[in-house]
Image (spheres, rainbow, N blue to C red):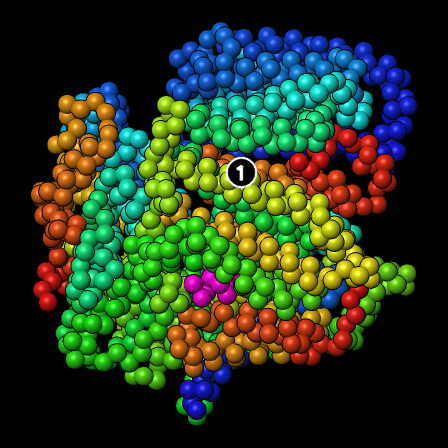
Amino acid sequence: MRNRYVVRAAIPAIIGVIAVTGCGSNKSSGGGSGSSGSHTVVIGMSAPLTGPLSALGLGMKNSVDLAIKQANAANKVKGWTIKFDPQDDQADANVGGTVAAHLASESNLVGVVGTLNSSVAQQEQKAYNDQNIVMISPANTNPALTQGDNYSSGNKSRPYASYFRVATTDAIQGPFAAQYLKSQGINKVATVNDQKTYGAGLVAEFEKQWKAQGGTITSHQTINPGDKDFSGVISKIKPTGAQALYYGGEYPEAGPLSKQMKAGGLNIPLMGGDGIYDPTYVKLAGPKSEGDLATSVGAPTDKLSSAQAFVSAYKSAGYKEDFSAYGAYSYDAANVIINALAKVLPGKTSIDSSTRQAIVAAVQSTDFDGVTGHVSFDQYGDTTNKVLTVYKVKGGAWVPVKTDTFNS
Amino acid sequence: MTQFLQQLTNGVVLGATYGLIALGYTMVYGIIQLINFAHGDIFMLGAFGGLALYDVLPHGMQDQIVIALPLCTLAGIALSVAVAVVMERVAYRPLRNAPRLAPLITAIGVSAMIEEGTRLWYPGAKAPLDFPQLLPSGAVTVGGVRISYASIVVVVVAVVLMIALQAFVLRSRTGRAMRATAQDPDTAKLMGINTDRVIVITFVLGAALAAVAGVLQGARLGTVRFDDGFIAGLKAFTAAVLGGIGNITGCVAGGFILGIVEVMAVQYLPSGSGYKDLWAFVVLILVLVFKPNGLFGEEVTVRA
Amino acid sequence: MTSAFLRIFDRYREQILRRTGPRGRVLLIAGVVLCLISSVLPWGVSGVGYTNPLGGNLQSVGIGGPRLYVLLLTLVACVGLTSVDGRRRSSLAASLGNLIISVYILRGLVHEGGGTGAVGVGAWVALVGSLVLFLGADTLPVTPRNVLPRLSAVADIALIFVVIGVGLAALVVGLDIEDDKQFVAFAIFVVALVVAANGLGVAAAFTSAFDRYRYIGYAVAAAAAFAFPFTQHGNAQWMAVFARVGVFAAAAIGLNVVVGLAGLLDLGYIAFFGIGGYVSALLSNAVFTTVHVHLPFLLVIPLGAAVAAFFGVLVGAPTLRLRGDYLAIVTLGFGEIFRIVAINWTGLTKGPNGIAGIPDLKLPGGFDFGKPHTVFGQLLPFQSNYYFLDIFLIAGVMVFFARVNDSRIGRAWVAIREDELAARAMGINTVALKLLAFGIGATLAGTAGTINVHIGEAIEPNAYQFIFSALLLSAVVLGGMGTVAGPILGAALLYAIPEKLRFVQDYRLFLFGLALILLMRFRPEGLIVSRRRQREFHEGGSGADAMSQPGQVAPV
């Protein structure tokens, strides 16, 4: 009987599958033991934990985990234990929406560290703001997130009162890059961007400053996130005589673009923002990427004296992944929330809407020295810290070449 | 003008890749009327097969393009062909007499499995992977137009394979059996042709050509990713329809036309580079509306 | 083939029963006894193993969690000792459920406790017991599914209440389980129970009862759907998920008109969903928008639907004259065109970033969808508002689907699907009717899309990739093509399970590919079966084949 044959064959298969793959245990990395108090408060995270940008996201996750463990161990928020709930947004705005809906529906959640991508943040801001949940990004750089859609026309207005960031914006990063390229004697630049919030914003700010200081934009090209064949774009840029290419976007596209530029005979440096400042970029772009440039927010973490304690604590905590570009910022972002909790929560027994509002207010008045420098926010929720660094690919790795405070 | 010629060469290289992939679609469709959605992923697997072998080659051989390129191509072919044969046997063959929707839906499932399987289990494939420099670097400049050696290799290999395939289908005994099966499987069976075997051979040939295209494209662009097959497969299918499905010469021509249209759109249309993936589909819809049998296809009667 | 075997088995059933009886009986009884004993013994060793026991304390004597499941399934498996039709299927399902649960728990105990030392005596007894039980069940003869006697109108209506009630209870209990492993054990239990009940003819009885008292059935189902938010105790998490599931279910029913009724494979369906979404997003004055217009939502719904319908006709009109598989590829191409345009037309769509900060819906009477409301003393989170809106949407779409299905148009669609040439010869205007189906599908998708963006509060082109068309399609295929309830079930399973089991999320698309292949191979008619469809997919078998399996659930 066919029926019996199928049933009998299924048994070893099913049991084998269970025995091998089994429970798929995913113990969430809770933030330490529950010894310090009976009440639980949750800090969430939205970052790409899988996918092409996971190197950055996992560094963010571990750093926040570290901050929370330290706070619990030191009993920083009296009577309360902090729990950590990291969620994977896959650097995808659509997934981000689901993550936000999930996190915002948790009744004990008061703050979220994230996101990595400006485009994802844009999809999450409202869900948190509606519930008065603090959102602090260590990496979003698009100015519109804090200053509103019309920031470039000088008409700034803050769309969401609960959104903050500890990273400097593209309104600073783009011009900083323009100033640096100019100082290197370059006059003609072509730009390419991936049309995402981050990439397009960065290029727009770069171009504004570049033209203001008398430079020429020889070509302005757009690509789509996920593209990989850039031969058409490169052939189009080549005859324009650009001396450098400024790219707004992230390393999964920037790496192959740089590689194909050089293979296609377009031997000019590619410069980008913090979205390409990652070792993976150098790997994807190949050995000919020597001399490519990137700006990133803040001073190099391991050069910063204030960051030494963080770096050594991170190392001794034994995380598998490196803290990467945004680890120190995520650590600071988590501590901003923890400090606000320490002010608001003691003496309270539950979290309601007024508690959350008090926490947002406490975050707004943040004022302390973090590992990346002094942390405080202006009226838009932007950081007041405006330090940036230019990195260059040398010997197959990013090397800092210039750290400075931006002034226009 | 130089710029036009420069972009034309880019288009020809792109078109050669589309043509190679399209052959697999056109042959399979010609013989069992199945749009094999997973064919684009077979193309992607070719690149991963080549990459996998490259990673285990000793260093001395890695640098010798003359040795490494053929070896990696063979590895790519081996992987693609193996998966294609399993796919045909396990997923498609049992459904040969099922309603038409069933194999199409199965093909979508196969495509998802190959793509996701690669992403989940090929080491590091969740991010784009670096593909080794398997093609010669450098270029010749003819009248201001820069033609890289890499693109010459791609086009030459593609054209040679296409001619060889055409000869195989027209001249060899198996080729004749393929044509007979395509025309009328039942009669072919009565004539003593093992149609199952012929169908497997068709899948094998298509997969091998796609794998070559995969390795060449990986080497030319310097990067591979698990979802490369999706858009490439769609465009290749468009090329096949454009040339008249089931028609090998037409299919190759369709590939070149599509490649050139795409590159020219990038060059001459405003914000063309952003819209570059769009034109294939616009062309597809226009062709189906105005010339459903393709540019080179003969009138085909609908078989029930 | 199968039916011939079944008839032979039917005739010699008594003999076969006698021949395989004694050995099977001994195995069955032994298995039942062992399983019953195991369900009260401790499965873990105290002090070792799970710190988070699988429902109740596994380390001590008592019944709870997986042990309760084993107990109940063992009781079900006792039908193997009777002579009821379908006993083989039922007791096999129950014993297999037991076996899988015990292996799963054993592995969990070994894994968490760091060795076999953590495994209590009960788990071992359960493993052996369910294996013996399974071998015993396997000796039972193959019989057709049981046909439950039809009692009375009261019994029929009671059955409708009980089945829907149990379904709702299972959903509530399942969602309440927070631990992944506990949930997996519970899911295995439920699946085994459903298969076993199906073998005993419960599904068929339910279907015929539902058919007879259709309006009562729908009323009970609607009541259960309305009751669901009240079981969540103000918790927003699942309301957020099910608000989304509802919209996808409505879109899936629309796709079912196209695929299930008219037999047109539309692989760009998500684009129409997206078009409705963009229309709605642009006309609601979002925070990050390009068009500063705010139209009332009751006006936006028909607008979004109309724009989607317009594009549906635009794509469908020229291509529907062609062969079916060309339509598939053209719609796929259209889906990509939509996405590429949405990415690049930054002046309207804001490109890859999409339009964010879409405000919550407000009805003319001042009802704000963004605020929680207290109903019957229960605080319902704001997501429930959207969930209720979904129910009205789905109800409307279902009524529409059912009416069309039973009309001349519906029959004409089926005729086209079965044999287009013959249909044309019968005087059916195939192109016009196919276009109608395509347009209706697009309209329904557009309508669902307008609501979807308000739930998500943002819209972004990558939410409309091909893979989401494929997911919707598989919701239809999994649930059952051509049925009304199928796509709802399919959408609920495909969208809610990955939310519940977050560890499968990464494997979601892989599993979905595998599921499509297996479904097409072994059960192309889906979970809920349309009788027409089943015949079509099992062509070659005699008509008696379909008739001899009355346990199949007919379209509801």
Mark 1 lies on a secondary structure that is helix
From where the camera sits, is residue C186 visible? no
Observer-nearest residue: C230 or A133? Answer: C230
Q: Residue at x 73, y 33 (%)?
A: C552
Instruction: Tell me the amino acid under the disc marked 1.
Output: Ala
Question: In x, y percent, where is residue C114?
Answer: 44, 22
* Principal secondary structure, stretch drawn in magenta: helix
Horizontal placement of A263 versus B179: left or right? left
Vertical relation: B130 (above or below) B296: above
Answer above or below: position of C282 versus A259.
Answer: above
- C339 inside magenta stretch: yes
Q: Residue furthest front?
A: C365
User: The N terminus of chain C appears in which quarter of the rendering?
Assistant: top right
> In the depicted view, which residue is nearer to us: C419 or C301?
C301
Instruction: Please state the extent of the stretch shown in magenta in the rendering.
Output: C335-342
Which residue carries the number 1 mark?
A: C492
In the picture, the quarter occupied by the C terminus of chain C is top right
Q: Could you tell me residue C328's position as x and y percent?
A: 63, 60
Residue found 27% across the figure and 64% down from its top? A201
Residue situated in front as seen by the camera: C264 or B276: C264
